[in-house]
Image: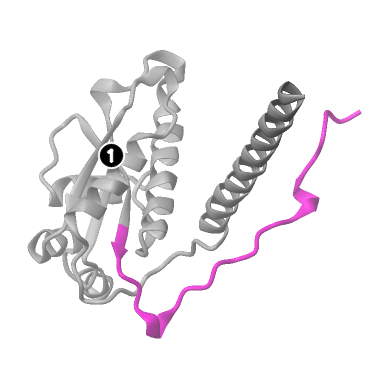
Amino acid sequence: MKINILKTALLSVLFAASLSLSAQTDSNVKAVMDNILTRASVRSFLEKPVEQDKIETMLRAAMAAPTDRNLQPWHFVVLNTPEAVAQYAGDGERAQRMKKTPLIIVVCADTARMAKGEVREIWIQDLSAATENLLLAAHALGLGAVWTTVHPIAAKVENVRKKLNMPANLYPMCAIRIGYPNPERKAEPKDKWDVNKITYGAWK
């Protein structure tokens, strides 16, 4: 009798634990999906610096990205002072908007850590994955961010390298503008779900 009672109690505990784990899993999935689906490109920021701990969190997320053969061919240039941002922005109308960005992270390829031969260009996938991680981490931290293109526009690549006095082994792929979103210019996420862009299986 006592054994049956113990068995029943144990099963109840296991069932309750299973329900709790399932609820926690559902909650984790919802949090991840909400973060992905509510992210939007933010181009207007408050005049407020981004804290160092948040910068490191974003960089940790970026470096957690998948990378071919674990080569990790990335290097991140952090511009988090008005002087550094102004040096990157340069002159012109667009530069004035750029100078209002509290933080810019330039995502670069380190040519010394690239794969060799026909798979050399895999660095683009590696850095793109790292950049997406960085964007999602920024959103999760209550920040806004936008991916701005450098590669493959040769003139932009050389301009960025020159403005930042980059060493020869670094090649800039993109620059991420980051800051606290300006509530007066709220960015709305786009619903890009489209079943017409999905194919299951091979074509016959």
Q: Nearer the viewer, residue 201 or 6?
A: 6
* Mark 1 lies on residue: 108
Q: Is residue 24 left or right of residue 8?
A: left
Task: From the top left corner, tell me how far across and down residue 4 is, in percent.
Answer: 76, 25
- The majority secondary structure of the magenta stretch comes to loop
Query: Is 182 above or below relative to 123?
Result: below
Task: From the top left corner, tell me how far across and down residue 114 is, in percent.
Answer: 33, 22
Q: Is residue 16 left or right of residue 61?
A: right
- In the picture, the quarter occupied by the N terminus is top right
Is 194 a magenta residue? yes
Q: Residue at x 86, y 31 (%)?
A: 203
Q: Quadrant of residue 38?
A: bottom right
Q: What crowding class fits label 1: few (fewer than 14 Cα within 10 Å), some (14-19), or many (20 or more)?
A: many
Provide the secondary structure element on which disc 1 rests.
strand
Task: From the top left corner, tell me how far across and down residue 30 is, in percent.
Answer: 59, 53
**Number of disc labels:** 1
The single residue placed furthest to the right in the displayed view is 204
**Magenta segment range?**
177-204
Q: Could one spot residue 159 in this view of the protein?
A: no
Q: Residue at x 21, y 34 (%)?
A: 170
Task: From the top left corner, tell me how far across and down residue 115 is, in percent.
Answer: 37, 18
What kind of residue is marked 1? Answer: Cys
Q: Nearer the viewer, residue 57 or 129?
A: 57
Q: Could one spot residue 67 in this view of the protein?
A: yes
